[in-house]
Amino acid sequence: MLMQYTNVNASWNSPNVTSSNSNKKTLYSSFSASPKHLDPVRSYSSNEWAIISQIYEPPLQYYYFKRPYELQPLTLKSMPKLVFLDKNFQRVSESQKNNGQFDYTRYDFELREDVFYQPHPAFAKNNNGYLYHRLDKKIETLKKQNNPEKVSELESIKKLSEFAKVGSRQLVADDYIYAIKRMAVRQNHSPILDTMKQYIVGLDAFSQSISQQLKSELETSGKSLKEHYFDLGQHGIKGVKKHSDFSFSILIKGHYPQFLYWMSMNFFAPIPWEAMKFYQQPFMNERNLTLDTSPVGTGPFYLAENNPNQRMRLVKNPNFHPEAFPEVPNDFPENLKQNYQKDTGKTLPLIDEVIYSLEKESVPLWNKFLQGYYDASGVSSDSFDQAISVSSNGNLGLTSAMKEKGIQFLNAIQPTIFYFGFNMADPTVGGYSEKQQKLRQAISIAINFEEYISIFLNGRGVAAQSPIPPGIFGHQSLPAGINSQVYHLDGERIKRKSLQEAKQLLADAGYPNGKKSDGTPLQLFYDTAATGPDSQSMLNWYRKQFAKLGIELVIRATDYNRFQDKVRGAKVQMFSWGWNADYPDPENFLFLLYGGNAAINTNGSGINSANYDNPEFNRLFKQIKTMGNSPERLRLIEQMIQIAQKDAPWAWGFYPKSLALYHSWLRNLWPNAMANNTLKYRNVDAQLRSQQQEKWNQPIVWPLWILFAILLISIWPLYNAYRKRQNYRVQNHQEESVITHSDELNRKIKES
């Protein structure tokens, strides 16, 4: 059972005193937006994957240190074996394989036998079977048996840690097959279903059949999806076969080299049927306990606490399979190699728990980092000058104040793009006519992303010319990769086109000086999830960019979850979003503009949020997506980029530079943009952290002593007056007593 206790040795101002002892191997981090989906079949946002990638384990992962990026087995004994088959599903000869004369590729997977799930009540059993799979009936039976204590005990459960029993079991091939079946259920809204059904043999037919059956069952039962257990084990996918408890295969159409990359992603993480049986009960739904809020995995950590309005806590999985910290490559710089070699060969994970605290604003987050209460931090614009010094040639370094604290930093261009998108299905900013193209081109020129990078990112970014960031095949460096719709060459330098050129394009589009035909200003709408106080200056900047063209920009801000729903429902006009590379291939960026992935063409599950759908771009995309990297593939990619640059479904935006600061007690923070399951490699010197926290957060008590002295001085006259008054009363009382005694004595004498 989980417990909370107070750390009596913590600093007076520690925000962690009620969560964990600072001497424990705990990593402290933060989140600014609560994750919406923790179910791996649905989740596709970086803030969600930061959590679930530590809990779930797909078959493959990326080598932590190797560059270029390389896959390795995670829950497999070895890398999947590839078998090439003809149209009759017979193995082809080596020469036929080399010449591409095959119709199918089969991937054979063999699992390790030492992988077990985290302790969880879904696996709890007794001699009669699973303890918690039919909770409503169990409560009903206990009531009939007149056992109010047991009924009350069950009905009072609000979270998983309150279940009396937990269990576990071995990972088997059925769990990976079950995950693929869940992906195929349309009601689960998997964002990659429409991509995968093009490749996995039989997935499309299975999806249609199973989704219809589930729809009928839900209509008949009157239950919601969360309350209805649908037994997927009775149904099979033609191209997904179990061969033994620890081996299975996936058959795909043709040849798709990127398929192995997908095998490192959470969509293909194993799901035990027991978890679904456990969660899909009315009892669990009433308590908001679902796979979407309480994941079940084989990874190095499990989610011990999920309070998205305050904090989330990951705890070391006691059942985690043997895995060691990897060898450091020989070509590493010697100083870095020595740092990482300290943990080589040690059993993972190296830390006991991770605590994510909700921080909606950057200033308190930064201050807590400087106090030592967060182990690592990004650098916001507000704190940039305090943390980073920029040399005359543009190189970034740490300020002396940061060096004195022993803080270190990492800096690299990310395989990521942040873009300003137009909804191509919108009647005003969308469409493919020349006038509609020119409207978007004019806006793309006016939105000065070089200025944005300078103001809001302190130079930590590069203005994008295409969807493909540096480091990915297909990216062209300047000046060859210039977007000629927005920039022009000035000698050897590229320059953004002038505002006059943008205004001319706007006039050609039918909006001279930003006015419509009736003379009223053109009004456009920008949807955003940027709602905090730190976002106001950025939103005002966007207004000014449009105002340069005479266009009135209306901001529609909402929370991130609502924003996601609006984008996927094509209910936005313009928006900003970003994409982190899932795998190091240009297809992973170009598919963001492929028409088959448009949100309006996929019931909102597609990843083409701009709803761009150009037939020629789509045709070329289908060619390049299955090709290996070659000069021919590069030539086709260049054609696609030129088409997209002219259509301008995005204003392209920028490729960000990551800048992470971390304290001297945090080890193994190596930049690996492809790997998401990296917390198991982190290590913390908790004793050094505790010492530094105590040093940096000494309580300042002298103002209290001064206040106490002032208080004493102020009450001293009152105290003296009180004492005098008491003494006066005592004296009067004594005098009265003497007089009374004398009178009594005189009376007695007279009487005698």
Image (cartoon, grey):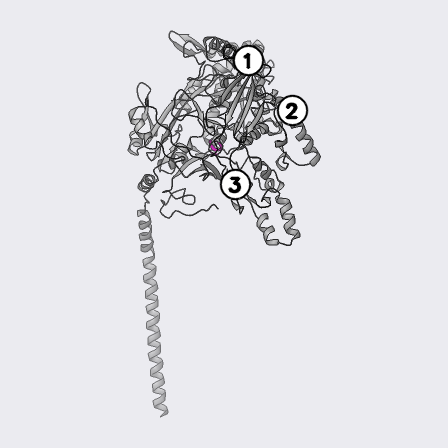
Q: Is residue 347 left or right of residue 604?
A: left
User: Could you say where residue 130 lies in the image, as x and y percent from the top left?
Assistant: 58, 43
Can you tell which of label 1 and label 2 is closer to the viewer? 1
Look at the image and tell me in which quarter the C terminus lies.
bottom left
In this rendering, the answer to whether 311 lies above or below 441 is below
Q: Which residue is under mark 2?
A: 208
Find out whether the residues at labels 1 and 2 contact each other: C-beta distance under 8 Å: no
Quadrant assignment, res 180: top right
- Judged from the image, the secondary structure of the residue bearing numbered disc 2 is helix
**Callout 2 crowding tier (Cα within 10 Å): few <14, some 14–19, many ≥20:** few
Q: Residue furthest right?
A: 220
Q: Is residue 549 left or right of residue 699?
A: right
- Judged from the image, the secondary structure of the residue bearing numbered disc 1 is loop
Marks 2 and 3, how far apart at CA: 33 Å
Quadrant assignment, res 236: top right
The amino acid sitting under disc 2 is Gln
Q: Residue furthest bottom?
A: 752
Magenta segment includes 52: yes
> Mark 1 or mark 3, which is nearer the start of the sequence?
1
Magenta stretch?
50-55
The amino acid sitting under disc 3 is His
The amino acid sitting under disc 1 is Phe
Q: Which residue is under mark 3?
A: 120
- Work out whether residue 489 or residue 549 is closer to the camera in this orientation and state it: 489
Find out whether the residues at labels 2 and 3 contact each other: C-beta distance under 8 Å: no
Can you tell which of label 3 and label 1 is closer to the viewer? 1
Marks 1 and 2, how far apart at CA: 27 Å
